[in-house]
Image: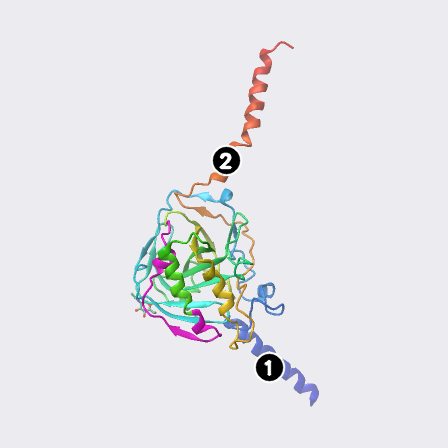
């Protein structure tokens, strides 16, 4: 009897564990060896060839003069931040109807659904997911949109189903007053969702644009990538803005100190919720029309100087008597 029953019990355990993997809701984590990012490659798409985040090398980005300013509609409406929820992996802010993103290089208008953040550990450890020229920032804001307002589950099946706007956030005493006020109003809610599973209805007082400050919507990088959490679906058109939003340092400190990753306030703090860099592979990052790449322009000129001098010398040589 035992010989028959043990394999059956095993089969049941395997069946149950593979089911929880397929949903993506399963047992992945950031902070423990058994479920952290190095184990994600076994999940659905996480081992694919267009994964995110990446380190954007400005000198290798291909400038596309067609990539003009993106258009944001409804982002200035201060009635659209509906709810904040601690998911145990981030704090997710649900957005109301009518926020739209469109622009060159996007195949359709996209509707904003939610935004969330990734962070490290306050001042001591930056936690943006993307890097620019090997540099990482304190936090990264992701505004998630679906193509033609499709449902999230449909968007996950379309290679261009999701468009994410990524903004870096940096703690600074130079933060503009209005931007600082908006972020302070937002972070006041963190205490109310400190444990996993808690949510809070937001009072209508700030808009997404208040949080973005005065972003230069003409300056960005664009590349095809994935969700940065399991199942890492390769369905995202990324738009990354290189100029960070400056917020008061206490805002950056609030996220890891006031949020917990379990339903207990004695449990671990919710911190370092970023995925490590992924290989860029054969992909090209595009730079928008108004991105000047001072570093790449400089690197094109300076290595060629000795070369020009060499040409000059070699062409002059025949005129000198031996
Ligand atoms: C967008 O999708 C949501 C959720 O599926 C739906 O309630 C809403 O009516 C849609 N909006 C438009 C403008 O189609
Ligand atoms: Zn994200």
Residue bearing the label numbered 2: 298
Ligand 2 within 8 Å of disc 1? The answer is no
Snapshot quadrant of residue 109: bottom left
Name the foreground residue: 312 vs 126: 126
- Name above or below for residue 4 compared with residue 264: below
Farthest residue to the top: give it: 321
Position of 272 relative to 260 (above/below): above
Q: Is residue 227 visible?
A: no
Name the front one of labels 1 and 2.
2
The residue nearer to you, when weighing 311 against 127, is: 127
Callout 1 touching callout 2 (CB < 8 Å)? no
**CA–CA distance in space, label 1 to label 2:** 62 Å
Residue sitting at the far bottom = 1
> Which quadrant: the N terminus?
bottom right
Measuring from the top left, give residue 73's x and y in whole percent: 30, 57
- State the image coordinates of residue 48 (x, y, percent, origin top left): 54, 59
Up/down of 310 relative to 20, above or below: above
Q: Please tell me whether mark 1 sits on a helix, a strand or a loop.
A: helix
**Label 2 C-beta lies within 8 Å of the nearest ligand 2 atom:** no
Left or right: 199 as drawn, with respect to 28: left
Q: What crowding class fits label 1: few (fewer than 14 Cα within 10 Å), some (14-19), or many (20 or more)?
A: few
Query: Crowding at label 2, few (<14), some or many (≥20) Cα neighbours within 10 Å?
Result: few
Q: Which mark is residue 12?
A: 1
* 227, 241: nearer the viewer: 241
Q: Which residues, given as a range, are shown in magenta?
A: 190-216
> Is 227 within the magenta?
no
């Amino acid at each position: 009897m035992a010989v028959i029953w043990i394999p059956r019990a095993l089969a049941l355990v395997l069946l149950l564990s593979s089911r929880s993997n397929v949903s993506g809701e399963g047992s992945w984590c950031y902070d423990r060896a058994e479920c952290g990012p190095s184990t994600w490659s076994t999940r659905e798409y996480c081992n694919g060839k267009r994964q995110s985040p990446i380190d954007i090398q400005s000198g290798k980005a291909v400038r596309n003069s067609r990539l003009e300013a993106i258009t944001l509609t409804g982002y200035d409406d201060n009635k659209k931040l509906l709810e904040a929820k601690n998911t145990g992996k981030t704090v997710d802010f649900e957005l109301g109807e009518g926020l739209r993103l469109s622009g060159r290089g996007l195949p359709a208008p996209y509707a904003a659904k939610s935004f969330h953040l990734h962070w490290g550990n306050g001042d001591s450890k930056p936690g943006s997911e993307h890097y620019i020229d090997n540099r990482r920032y304190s936090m990264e804001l992701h505004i998630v949109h679906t193509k033609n307002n499709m449902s999230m589950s449909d968007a996950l099946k379309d290679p261009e189903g999701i468009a994410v706007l990524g903004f870096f956030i940096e703690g600074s005493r130079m933060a503009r007053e209005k931007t600082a006020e908006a972020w302070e109003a937002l972070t006041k809610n963190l205490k109310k969702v400190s444990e996993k599973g808690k949510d809070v209805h937001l009072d209508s007082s700030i808009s997404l644009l208040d949080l973005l400050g005065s972003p230069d919507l003409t300056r960005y990088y664009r590349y095809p990538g994935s969700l940065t959490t399991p199942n890492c679906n390769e369905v995202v058109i990324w738009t990354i803005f290189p100029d960070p939003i400056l917020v008061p340092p206490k805002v950056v400190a609030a996220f890891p100190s006031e949020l917990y990753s379990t339903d207990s306030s004695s449990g671990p703090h919710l911190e370092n919720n970023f995925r490590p860099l992924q290989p860029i592979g054969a992909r090209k990052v595009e730079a928008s029309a108004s991105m000047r790449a001072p570093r790449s322009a400089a690197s094109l000129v300076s290595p060629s100087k000795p070369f020009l001098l060499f040409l000059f010398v070699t062409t002059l040589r025949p005129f000198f008597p031996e």
